[in-house]
Amino acid sequence: MLILLPPSEGKAERGTSTVRRLGFPELASPREKVLDALVSLCRTPEARDVLGLSEGQAGEIERNLALPTARTLPVAALYTGVLYDNLGLATLSPEARRRADRRIVVFSALWGLLRPSDRVPPYRLSMGVRLPPMGGLAAFWRPSISAVLDATKGLVVDMRSATYAAAWQPGERGVAVRVLREAAGKRTVVSHMAKATRGVVARALVETPDRPRTAGDLADLLTGLGHRVELAAPAGRGRPRTLDVIVDE
């Protein structure tokens, strides 16, 4: 089972060592290309507009310029925000941490794919950026990421945002997790609460040694863990199924 997560804009500040060998070594070449292009961009006046930064975020450009020699920290500690706060990788048991490192894959515009134990420096780059000279990063990463993940087996639990989902789709073995809020008999899609719920669900899936093999197995597992879920049919042939997690207002 793979659990796909987006990164977060919020990142911890302090690292202790330089970048070493990362997981998914097949991505070394595209990683180097994106890193070089990002540093080159940040030497130009256009950097703030291309990266979508406000005047108050100018410090992010200096951070990117320092990436080649910047200190690193584990991905498990790097990303902050609602999803990662509720996932709580640092508070997992040793067994659950090992499972998290096998099961969780974080999509990154700079690094492609990351495991929780990988060490990288804080950076600022979104998959939605059109980075000169390669253009849209989702399209740039898609061939390399597809070559890696298409070769894997098993259920794919997809909790990414649309921006990052554009870089790879798991097809029929995927289950996209959607969070719905129920109030007064009506259900609506939520955003902030969705991040928290996805973090909780991801934590549950690394705390359990169970390995669901199908969408139905996943729904049964989460129901047994106390979640209200409903499994929808795929939108078409070769498309992932949708698993709705229902939360009360």
Image (cartoon, rainbow, N blue to C red):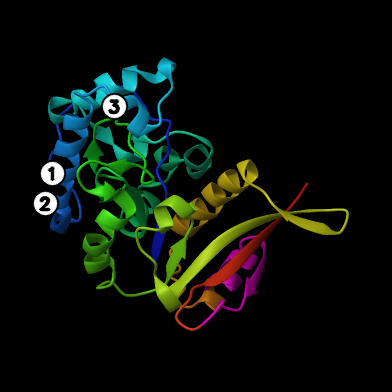
The image position of residue 119, as x and y in percent, is 23, 38
Task: Check the image and name the residue furthest to the right.
Answer: 184
The residue tagged 3 is 46
Q: Is residue 100 above or below residue 69?
A: below
Q: Which residues are magenta?
A: 218-236
Q: Secondary structure at mark 3?
A: loop
Q: Residue at x 52, y 64 (%)?
A: 176
Q: CA distance from mark 2 to mark 3?
A: 25 Å
Q: Residue at x 25, y 19 (%)?
A: 62
The image position of residue 85, as x and y in percent, is 50, 37
Image side of residue 214 versus residue 248, left or right: left
Q: Residue at x 14, y 58 (%)?
A: 26
Q: CA distance from mark 3 to mark 1?
A: 21 Å
Could you tell me the amino acid type at mark 3?
A: Glu
Q: Nearer the viewer, residue 138 or 11?
A: 138
Residue 230 magenta-drawn?
yes
Q: Earlier in the sequence, mark 2 or mark 3?
A: 2
The residue tagged 2 is 29
Disc 3 crowd rating (10 Å Cα; few below 14, some 14-19, many 20+) is: few
Could you tell me the amino acid type at mark 2?
A: Ser
